[in-house]
Amino acid sequence: MNLETQAPDTETLSVLETAALLRELTAGLIAVTDFDEALTQLVRIARAAVAGVTWCGFTALRAGEPAGVAASDPALAGLDDLRHGPDSPAMSAIHRREMILAEDLAQESRWPAWTTRARDLGVRGVISAPVDVDEQVIGAINLYASASAALTTRHQLTAMLVAEHAGLLLAAVRDRERRAAQAHELDAAQLVDGVVGQAIGVIMTQRGCAAPEALKVLRSAALSLDIPVRQVAERLVVTVSRPREN
């Protein structure tokens, strides 16, 4: 059967572009373990990938308090920072749990002080979409345009999809961040634990390595033997404590 090849229409291209953006966001954040770094990656990718958007920012709240800001252009970071005033499109999006659109800031009256600062920086339009991260952290992704009426229905759909996807990715980053912190605390505890600490000292002496490296050796042995780290440490300490036969 002979199929005619037709050029995809504009709407199809929009879907393909959005899918590419979501893939790029996933690739950029999938291995990140620092929340602030993830926000920086998020706004950089969104700014570069969404046509018609001149700048991108992110506003984060943790337990109701400002918890992080990221901006594709540092000059505009103050627009996303709630410490400069809570009256902003981002805060409206977070409080109302819905997307906020201001197509032309010259006609905008909802955030007088914020709008004046934004216009002075060259911003003419903004979309803010709420982002649910986890039980403690919420935020908003902010897309800025340098021309009035530049943000269309297509941009609103893209903002909604990016916000939903970003929430999932940032939740995963937060989880990895917590796990890394817990692992660090566990390392610190094990380094001072009696028998584990002794075993670490033995390995450090034998191998001439630092304590964290010695702990890795213990964990590797425990994994290979399928027994707890403490049991490996006890065996090692007992072994080196035995009198040597002459």
Image (cartoon, rainbow, N blue to C red):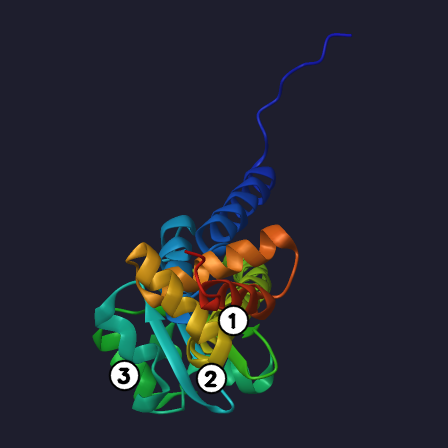
Q: In the image, what residue type sits under mark 2? A: Leu
Whether residue 221 sits left or right of residue 53 in the image: it is right
The Cα atoms of the two marked residues, 1 and 2, are separated by 13 Å
Which residue is at a point 52% across and 60% down the rendered structure image?
219
Return the mark for residue 61: 2
User: Which marked residue is nearer to the observer: mark 1 or mark 2?
Assistant: 1
Q: Give the labeled residue for mark 3.
A: 116
Q: Nearer the viewer, residue 88 or 211?
A: 211
The Cα atoms of the two marked residues, 2 and 3, are separated by 23 Å
Which residue is at a point 50% across and 76% down the rendered structure image?
195
| Residue situated furthest front in the rendering | 246
Whether residue 70 sits left or right of residue 237 in the image: it is left
Q: In the image, what residue type sits under mark 3? A: Thr
Return the mark for residue 174: 1
User: Can the viewer see residue 54?
Assistant: no
Label 1 vs 3, first from the N-terminus:
3
Q: Nearer the viewer, residue 225 or 153?
A: 225
Picture quadrant of residue 33: bottom left
The reply to whether callout 1 and callout 3 are in contact (CB within 8 Å) is: no
137 w.r.t. 242: above or below:
below
Which residue is at a point 39% across and 87% down the rendered structure image?
111
Q: Give how far across and how far down residue 108 sits, in percent.
A: 40, 81
Q: In the image, what residue type sits under mark 1? A: Arg
User: Which marked residue is nearer to the observer: mark 1 or mark 3?
Assistant: 1
User: Can the viewer see residue 233?
Assistant: yes
Q: Quadrant of the N terminus?
A: top right
User: Which marked residue is nearer to the observer: mark 2 or mark 3?
Assistant: 2
Picture quadrant of residue 53: bottom left
